[in-house]
Structure formats: C-alpha cells, structure tokens
Amino acid sequence: MTPCTVTTGFFTLGKCGVMAVAGCPSCGRALCANHITEGGLCPECAAARNQVGHPAAAAAYRRRTHRHRTSQEYSDAGWYTGFDSYDRAPFDPGAGANQDYLDDGSDALVDS
Amino acid sequence: MFWRDQKAALAGFHPLHQALVHERGFAATQPAQGWTALIDSLYRHAGLVKRGKWALPARTLDVLVPLIIEICSDLGPKGTLAVTADLRGRDVPGKTGPERKLAVRPPIRSASEAWVVDPWLRLRGELRDGSILEILVVDRERKRKITKRNPRGKTKWKRKSKVVQTIRVRRRLPVDAVSRVPATPPPPWIGAFVREGERRSILAAAKLTRMPASGQEQVDRILSVATEPFRWTSENRGIA
Ligand SMILES: [Zn+2]
Ligand SMILES: [Zn+2]
C-alpha cells in the first residue's frame, strides 16, 4: 500500500498515512480519497493557487499563513522553511506522532 | 421565518450550540469528531435563526470555532479537547471585584476602582505527539470612578476604563521528549518560561494592553503565543 503523504496537524506535524488512491498532478505526492481537492490537486498545491474550497486546502492555507506570519514575528526563519522542507519530505511511517501517551493530570494551568 | 420555526430549528441544534445560545457558554470535553459536529451545527445557525435574542454570542464563529478547528487537527484519535467558554461578556454579575477607594488630592474629591475579571476561554488538548496543550485567555478591565470639583465649585464625576488581556499557554511535553531553547527569543510581547518536572513544561504568556480589533486578530494573537512552546521541539519545526 502507498500511504497518503499529505501533511496534517497545525502545531504538531504528521503525514496522513491513509491508503493513497491517486497522485497530485502538480507535485506528484500520493493522495488518499479525502485529500483530493479541486482539479485533483493535493491540499498544498491547491492552497498555493488560492483554491481553498476543500476543507483540507483551507487548512493547508491557514497553516502556511500561520507559519509564515509567526516565523517573521519570531524572527525564526527555520520555523517556516523547516516546515516547507518537512512538507516535501518523503513519508516515514512511524515518525512523529506518538499515540501512546498518558496524562498525569496534575496542576492544571491556573490563572492567578 | 416565524419564531416557532426558528425555535424548532434551535431545538435541533447540537446541545453545546443550544448552550451557547441560551447560556452564552459551555464546558465540555470530547474528541475531534464531537467538535466537528458542534461546528457543523453552528454553521447552520445563520441560515435558520434570525431572531436577535437567539443570536450566537460574540467571539463564537470568529474566535472559538477557528481555534477549535486548528487544535482538533493536532489531537490523536483517542485524544480529547476540553473547552470552557464563557462568552457572556464582562458585564455580568460575579465578574466585578470589590470597589476600592484610592488616595486622592484636590481638586479630586474621591476616586475608587474595581477590577472586572473575565476568563472567557480555556482550552486543553491531548495532542497526538503526547503533549498536552493548555490555553487560557482572560480579559481584565479596570473601572475607575472619579469625583472632582471644578474651579466654579461644581462637583463633576467621570468614569474611566482600561482593558487588558492576558493569554497564557502551556505545553506539557511527552515524558521522553527532547527539547531545546530556540535560536531566537520570542517577540518582546511574549514571555517564555520553562518548568522542569517529570515532564518538562514550556509556558508562554502575553499581556495585551491594546485589545484585538477583530476576531482574526484575536485568533492570530492566541496562536502566536501558542507557537512558542512548539518551537522547542524539532519535530514541530518540521526538520524531520
Ligand atoms: Zn501537490
Ligand atoms: Zn490523506
């Protein structure tokens, strides 16, 4: 099976990983059924063309805008360029997301 | 549309949607699908309900919804997002603290101040990378009442108000996470702190002395502060 390599998440970054059924005609990345947007494009390519009708394209657009804006705000160039290279990086199953977590629930964020 | 039709539409909305209309807030914990169901319901509101009395509170669609959407995309399949939203505004009973007399000198005859504290948004998400993200937004208004005697001997009084907003974010890292100080400091309006423990926490806080002028600006401010704790771990920087 070829996994979908669309980037997911807003602060945490991950790859979709669901079985791909097509490729993006622009960048060639593997896409699952949920990540095919207008014209068959992947969400990132659609966002780059300001085609944000598909929810995943709108999400990609907002994430890019946020990364770009905050990398300037923080004078942290790598915050955006690193994301860019991540987004184009090959898919490595098992990288990033760690579902197996426990919360100890202690001391909540308390306003004083 | 008649009110009874609108009332029927309201009754069919998501329970938290109804709580927003009738109580101007809610507290709930649920996984991403639950929040998606609420947001789908909220998007149907404008088309079905026109009566002003049943309008969604300010900050619902332009602040609360965008924040929930972004954070839900970071939740794991089993992770939940807890939201406590109080969108009643500052002028409701219980939010104003005691009035305190201030020392004055002529021509001011008396002055008093009271603080209104409005913690209107609290979010807590169990993210898929194993970290816990918490966001707290509090508006504080200082209300002053001043009585003054003018040169003609007439007593006049006036009110002054100043509003500040604090945004506090904490990301509790996964137990074995590798983190390091980012190469650049946050912008001057954001402070960052680290709390060591079994799990390291990165805290970021900001105090806005000028209130955001739009929902978009409010969302951007909150997301800007929330960005800092994610710069500390390389996975989120995208350098994989
Ligand atoms: Zn593409
Ligand atoms: Zn996909």
Image (tube, grey):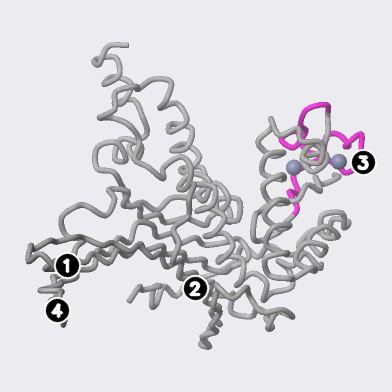
Magenta stretch: dominant secondary structure? loop
Q: Position of residue B141 (x, y in %)?
A: 29, 63
Q: Which residues are magenta?
A: A15-39
Q: Are marks 2 and 3 on the same chain?
A: no
Chain to which the residue tagged by mark 1 belongs: B
| Left/right of residue B153 with respect to residue B69 in the rendered view | left
Along the line of sight, which residue is nearer the eye, A40 or A20?
A40
Tell me if the residue at label 3 has its CB under 8 Å from ligand 1. yes
Q: Which amino acid type is shown beneath numbered disc 4?
A: Pro
Using the image, determine if residue B56 lies above or below residue B98: above
Chain to which the residue tagged by mark 4 belongs: B
Instruction: Specify the label residue B205 is tagged with.
Output: 2
Q: CA distance from mark 1 to mark 3?
A: 68 Å
Question: Mark 4: few, some, or many residues within 10 Å (few <14, many ≥20)?
Answer: few
Q: Which amino acid type is shown beneath numbered disc 3?
A: Gly
Q: Which residue is mark 4?
A: B106
Using the image, determine if residue B68 lies above or below residue B100: above
**Which tag is nearer the camera, tag 4 or tag 2?**
4
Tell me if the residue at label 4 has its CB under 8 Å from ligand 2. no
Counting residues from the start of the chain, the first of labels 4 and 2 encountered is: 4
Using the image, determine if residue A19 lies above or below residue A77: above
Q: Are marks 4 and 2 on the same chain?
A: yes
Q: Are marks 1 and 4 on the same chain?
A: yes
Residue farthest to the bottom?
Answer: B196
Instruction: Specify the label residue B146 is tagged with.
Output: 1
What residue do we see at 11% from left, 73% from top? B110
Q: Which residue is mark 3?
A: A28
Along the line of sight, which residue is nearer the eye, A85 or B53?
B53
